[in-house]
Amino acid sequence: MDFKQEIKDRANIVDSYMESFLPGEDEYPEVIYKAMRYSVFAGGKRLRPIMVMEACKAFGGDWEKTMPFACAIEMIHTYSLIHDDLPALDNDDYRRGRLTSHKMFGESMAILAGDALLHHAFETMAKACVELNDIKYNKAMLAIAEGAGVHGMVAGQVVDVISEGKEIDKDTLDFIHKNKTAAMLIGALKSGAEMGVACDEDIKKIERVGELVGVAFQIQDDILDVTSTFEKLGKPINSDEKNHKVTYATMFGIEKASKIVEEMSDEAIDILKSMGGDMDFLIRLTEYLIKRDN
Ligand code: FPP
Ligand code: MG
């Protein structure tokens, strides 16, 4: 089967579980549930939940039990995109080919929809931890919390914001990528591995894979911002230039940046190959991520 189709099949599974974890739209006050659903069901690739499920499977775990955690990480990802698009941050009007949350529902409701998704993610995970009553699920929640939190995605976003319009060096740029983007991918892979049966050494290795794949993913994102089209990305291109952002693409040029992406994913694949468990899907996912065009 075509790998894109394999991703799509898994994304459909994520969506059906997501439907069961999110409140319906007919509850009062409807507008917040509508705003949450508008962004969650906007056609995201569901990469982070797929990483949770597949890391768990690779280490011999029961993927169905990961679904509250897989959906929660997508809720957190969605909140971060809603807030990132706000006028006070990147001030973007389009995301995934549709108007951004604040353009649809107004700024106050977009802020609240982000807040609501973040809290609902933790409510969903905490409920599952209580029901499943096994410490490995608490560890999975912790991995996701660390990825999203102030020592992860939020720290990266902070440095991204304070660096805007400034000449930053490679270390600062790497800090941004490692935290803003890679931390959530590390959280996804680590939480999945925790819900399987991974030894400490493999957990360490999977964290490094998440870091490499995450940084490579972000560099690829920056390359696409220059080389792709609105139609393919579902958002305007050249937004980094508009926001005076230094990226790997502006620092090293497209060719060198692409080479770095390739080297990082090769290293990630080598580590995956060195691990116990069936890493086949994660290897193919890594290859797919560097070749993606959206
Ligand atoms: C695209 O993911 C998203 C990224 C590359 C990460 C960007 C990170 C932020 C905007 C952090 C924001 C943080 C805060 C605290 C506001 P994707 O290609 O998987 O997108 P998709 O879900 O649309 O497929
Ligand atoms: Mg931003």
Image: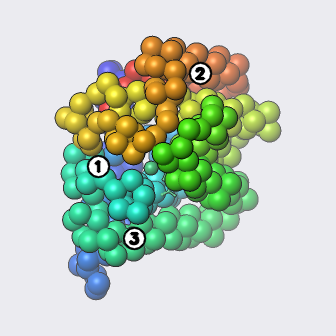
What residue sits 62% from the left and 65% below the top?
129
- Rendered location of residue 138, percent (x, y): 68, 60
- Three-letter amino acid code at disc 1? Arg
What is the x, y in percent for residue 51?
52, 39
Give the colour scheme of this rendering: rainbow
Quarter-of-image position of residue 197: top right
- Kindly identify which residue carries mark 2: 264
Q: Tell me what residue is drawn at x 65 percent, y 59 percent.
A: 150
Badge 3 marks a residue whose secondary structure is helix
Q: Which residue is mark 1?
A: 95
Q: Pick out the residue farthest to the right.
A: 200
- Quadrant (top left, top right, bottom left, bottom right) of the C terminus: top left
Viewport quadrant of the N terminus: top left
Residue 15 or 74: which is nearer the viewer?
A: 74
Could you say which quadrant of the image residue 36 lies in?
bottom left
The kind of secondary structure element at disc 1 is: strand
195 is higher (above) or lower (below) than 24: above
CB of residue at label 3: within 8 Å of ligand 1? no
Which residue is disc 3 drawn over?
A: 111
Residue in the foreground of this view, choosing between 225 and 71: 225
Nearest the eye: 83 or 90: 90
Residue at image location 56% in from the left, 33% down from the top = 215
Q: CA distance from mark 1 to mark 2?
A: 27 Å
Classify 10 Å Cα crowding around label 1: few (below 14), some (14-19), many (20 and above): many
Residue 146 makes an appearance in the image? no
Residue 97 to residue 280: above or below: below
On screen, residue 244 versus residue 294, left or right, reads: right
Between marks 3 and 1, how big is the CA–CA gap? 16 Å
The one of 118 and 216 positioned closer to us in this rendering: 216
Residue 247: give x, y in percent of width and height.
49, 33
